[in-house]
């Protein structure tokens, strides 16, 4: 059976402070230039959008293991690329 491609994104109602802390931890070890000014995923420039891109980087860096998309309950699965589509589709 073909499995739908999924992304790990920040839960839209997550605490922005928690998202900032998570992004700091992840970006200390992964390349997060895509969410910096001029980066391919900089817009929209808000915490949830940036955290979504970073959470997905982490998820993909860990072989898309479901356990790597949690972040204290601040993450969820998404059915389209958070860098390309900003409409929420809960998995």
Image (cartoon, grey):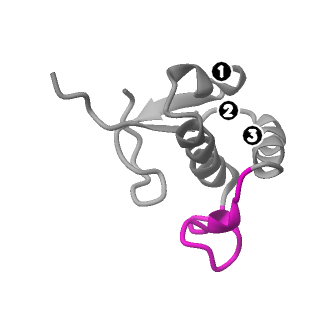
Q: Are marks 2 and 3 in contact (CB under 8 Å)?
A: yes
Q: Residue at x 25, y 28 (%)?
A: 3
Our reading of the magenta stretch's main secondary structure is: loop
Which image quadrant: the N terminus? top left
Q: Position of residue 81 (x, y in %)?
A: 41, 51
Residue most extreme to the left:
1
Identify the element where label 2 is drawn. loop
Identify the element where label 3 is drawn. helix
Q: Mark 1: few, some, or many residues within 10 Å (few <14, many ≥20)?
A: few
The quadrant where residue 89 appears: top left
- The residue that label 1 is drawn on is 73
In the image, 82: left or right of 27?
A: left
- Is residue 26 located in the magenta-colored stretch of the structure? no
Q: Earlier in the sequence, mark 3 or mark 1?
A: 3
- Is residue 42 located in the magenta-colored stretch of the structure? yes
Closer to us: mark 2 or mark 3?
3
- The residue that label 3 is drawn on is 19
Q: Are marks 1 and 2 in contact (CB under 8 Å)?
A: yes
- The residue that label 2 is drawn on is 14
Q: Is residue 26 above or below residue 32?
A: above
* Region in magenta: 30-45
């Amino acid at each position: 059976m073909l499995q739908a491609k999924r992304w790990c994104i920040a839960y839209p109602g997550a605490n922005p402070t928690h998202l900032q802390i998570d992004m700091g931890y992840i970006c200390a070890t992964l390349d997060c230039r895509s969410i910096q000014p001029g980066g391919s995923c900089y817009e929209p420039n808000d915490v949830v959008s940036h955290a979504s891109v970073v959470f997905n980087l982490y998820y993909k860096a860990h072989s898309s293991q479901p356990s790597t998309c949690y972040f204290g309950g601040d993450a969820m699965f998404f059915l389209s690329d958070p860098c390309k589509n900003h409409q929420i589709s809960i998995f």
